[in-house]
Amino acid sequence: MSATVITKGSKHTLSILVKHNLNTLSRIIGIFSAKGFEMDSLTFASEADPGMARITITTRGDDKTVEQINKHLHNVVDVVKVIDLTHKKCIERELAIIKVSTAKAGRPEIMLIAQAFKAKVIDITIDKLALEVTGNSDKVDAMLEVLKPYGVTAVSRSGSIALKREFQGAVNIN
């Protein structure tokens, strides 16, 4: 049996169940700011249970750093539960809207790229296309990289949202 080794700077996804309170969000952001913890993305949304919310944070660090983050988060009054989804089976998605410059000649190629990434065209003008793509952050990064030569003019990304996967068998859904 081999142990998983986390190198300094590896990505961790934290799912935090909290009482729905914006002061809780500011306290959590304050922890990251005061302690110098890195935060790649943060999402905050209401939960299915009224009065509750879920915060998803992606951060980077070694196991010791993430353990410190976890301890600090548990000290926040309205935090109910913190789960590090990094080594668990989970469902993780990100949404991005990407605007790309288009000349009429390049438009068909961009449409093929969108199709390959299962992205949707959500706005179109004479000289630009807006594409919507969802998937893990690697998929969004890959699509951005492929579109760079065409002239990406704007990007808006949601950051990761994630939940622990309940089904523990093999799943091949993209």
Image (cartoon, helix red, strand yellow):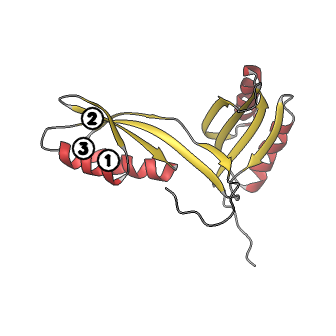
x, y percent for residue 125: 22, 28
- Residues at marks 2 and 1 touching, judged by CB atoms closer than 8 Å: yes
Q: Residue at x 38, y 49 (%)?
A: 118
Badge 3 amino acid: Tyr
x, y percent for residue 54: 70, 34
Q: Which residue is mark 1?
A: 114
The front one of 62 and 15 is: 15
Dot 3 or dot 1, earlier in sequence: 1
Dot 2 or dot 1, earlier in sequence: 1
For label 3, the crowd category at 10 Å Cα-Cα, with few meaning under 14, some 14 to 19 and many 20 or more, is some
Badge 2 amino acid: Leu
Q: Secondary structure at mark 2?
A: strand
The front one of 1 and 29 is: 1
- In this view, the residue farthest toward the left is 105
Is residue 130 among what the camera can see? yes
| Res 82 → quadrant | top right
Badge 1 amino acid: Ala
Side of 16 where 106 appears, left or right: left
Q: Which residue is mark 3?
A: 150
- Residue 129 disc label: 2
Dot 2 or dot 3, earlier in sequence: 2
Is residue 9 among what the camera can see? no
Q: Residue at x 37, y 45 (%)?
A: 119
Q: Residue at x 82, y 33 (%)?
A: 79
